[in-house]
Structures are given as C-alpha cells and as structure tokens.
Image (cartoon, rainbow, N blue to C red):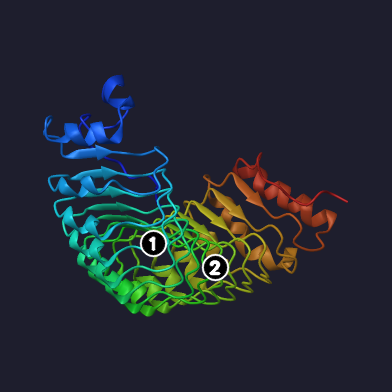
Amino acid sequence: MGNSNFNHSHSDNRLGSGSVSHIIQNISINQILNSLHQVSSTELNLSNRGLTNLNPRIFQFTQLTYVDLSNNQLRSLPTEIGNLKVLESLDLSNNQLSSLPTEIGNLTLLTELNLHSNSLTSLPERIGNLTLLTQLNLDFNNLTSLPTEIGNLTSLTQLNLFDNNLTSLPETIGDLTSLTQLNLDFNNLTSLPETIGNLTLLTQLNLRSNYLTSLPTEIGNLTSLTQLNLDFNNLTSLPETIGNLTSLTELNLHSNSLTSLPETIGNLNSLVSLNLRSNNLTSLPETIGNLNSLVSLNLSYNHHLLFDNIRGILNINQNPLLNRIIILHNGQFSPADITELRTIFSRVNSDDSVFPPAA
C-alpha cells in the first residue's frame, strides 16, 4: 500500500526544524524569517506550531524549495502561495484545509505534495499544471471526485487517496502511466474505468472497502502487479483476464460475493497468498492446484463450499511450500472428510493448517 509519509533527502539546515540547534528550534517565526536571508536557506519548517494563518512575509522568500507546514490548524492558504515558484516539496498534512487556491498551479517544479489528513472536498483544475509531481498524498480527505486534469500528472509514481468519498474515477486516470502505487482503499467506488488497464507499471493496487460489483477486463493488462487488494467489496465474479497477472504474489478477496473463480486463476504461478474468506463460493476450479508458489490459502466462511467441492484442489498437496490452509465453517464436513483432509495436508507441513473441529 502506499506510504503516507514521503521520504525527504533534504539537508539539516531547514530553518525552524528540530535538526537545527536548540536556539533555532525555539525562536519565533519572525526571527526565523529574519534569518532566512542570512543563512541562505532554501528550506523552511514551520510544522507543529499551532498556526491558523500564515505570515505573509513567507511568500517573499521565493528561493524556497522545501516548505513544511504540517500539523498546524490552517483552514485556508493565501493566493500568495503561488509566488513560491521554485518549490519542490510542500507538506500541508494534518491541517484543516477545505480547499486549495488555484494559484497552487503555479508551483510547476513541485515533485512532492502532501495533503494527508485535511478536509478537502475538491481539487482545483490547475492541479494538472504540476506535471513534475512524483508523489501526491491525499489520504484522509473528503474528496468526492477528481478533476479530469489529474491525468496531466504523468510523472506520478505514487498516488494516495485512502479514505475519501470518491464515487468514480475520471477516464484520465489511465494517463498516469508512471504510477507504481495507487491506493483507493475506503472510498465509495462502484466501478473502475477501462483505462485503469493503461497503468502497466503498477505494482500495488489497493481497493479495499469500496462498492465494486465487477472489474473491467482491462485489469488483466496490469502485468506488473504484485499486490491486488479487493477485500470488502461486492464482487460477484472475476474476469478471465485476472489470469494474466502472473507477477501477483498477494491477492486479497476477503468479504465479497464471489460464487466461482475463473479457470485462469491457475495461471497465477507467483501467487504466495490467496484470501477468499467470506464469499459465496460453491466450488473451486481444479486449476487452483497449479499454484505452485502458494503458501497461504484462506477459504474460511464460504458456507456453501462442501467437501466434494474442494476435491479438485487436493493435488495442491504436491506443493511443498503450502503451510497454511484455512477452511473453517464451510459447510457440513463429516468426520471422515476431516480425517481425510488432515491426512492429506499433514504431508505438506500443515501444522498451521486449520480445519473444522471433529464432531
């Protein structure tokens, strides 16, 4: 999943930061600003100061490349923020911002923009001017939509939108072809645009706790994916193209409404963990037995999956890597069924396996 904290390689001469001497740490904001020219600093840290507004003098220092205003109580940004035209990193996380001025679009050299934990309901169209952005963090806001101009941010490698109120994604999301991590957990998405399939460099796609009922066939184009998280959605089926994701090591489908799996699931020969807990599966394709890298398989709480339905996967006992299979509460297992399962999986280091209790 995407990391909420951006990593910075900036030097330790940020004015106002804890890395400067204790004298600098404790001086007033006016003193910090008075010192900016004297020490020729291009970095300013005013985090954790309880600020409700910004001293207008800040925007006179147009040499700034790094500004940290995180963990304050800012409700708005002045339009003068657009004066900082050589700014490369701006951290506004953990404030109370409900909107951004259009002048944010003047910051065309930004590579990192952190807006984590604010109250944003929308983004200005001119966000699309920030074409050098590689990391954009919008976790924990109140966004209901994204502007189509988001697709201009073609340098983005990491986009975090965890815990917003998004109901859909613009088609232009597919233009973000440099993305490697996309976090959309805890939104209100009911579908994905077909253009999601253009994001062929994605290695991690998080879509937990949405309202997805299906996936576009183009999901199969994401052949670089190693983690796909779809827990707590309303999926009733998976497209056949899921079998194209041969780099996947982790596939999470906990708490959906799946009644079956495509035969192509057996193509996922890099898969280490497959979580199918709490679905409506009635049977499993025999091809699951081809998952030779599988270490963990969770079939718990599929109440209609009876013993006869899983005979097709028993050849998985040829896999020496498998050390955990959970099949609790999947129907009426007879004592003979349980005995047979224990015998089969005891051959493959199943000390950690979990079965229904014997009658």
Say if 301 sits above or below 6 in the image. Answer: below
**Which residue, given by chain and number where applicable, does mark 1 sit on?**
246
Residue 224 location (% of width, % of height) = 33, 60
Q: Is residue 118 visible?
A: yes
Question: Helix, strand or loop at disc 1?
Answer: loop
Residue 239 location (% of width, % of height) = 48, 76
Q: Is residue 133 visible?
A: no
Left-right relation of 22 to 216: left
Left-right relation of 189 to 154: right
Please rate how many residues cluster around mark 2, counting C-alpha atoms within 10 Å: few if below 14, some from 14 to 19, many from 20: many
Give, as a three-letter code, the residue at label 1.
Thr
- The mark that comes first in sequence, 2 or 1, is 2
Residue sitting nearer the eye, 313 or 157: 157
Residue sitting nearer the eye, 95 or 26: 26
**Which residue, given by chain and number where applicable, does mark 2 sit on?**
210
Left-right relation of 240 to 332: left
Give, as a three-letter code, the residue at label 2.
Asn
Q: Residue at x 70, y 55 (%)?
A: 327
- The quadrant holding residue 246 is bottom left
Q: Which mark is residue 112?
A: none
Residue 219 location (% of width, % of height) = 40, 72
Viewer-side label of 2, 1: 2
Please rate how many residues cluster around mark 1, counting C-alpha atoms within 10 Å: few if below 14, some from 14 to 19, many from 20: many
What separation in Å lies between label 2 and label 1 (alpha carbons)? 25 Å
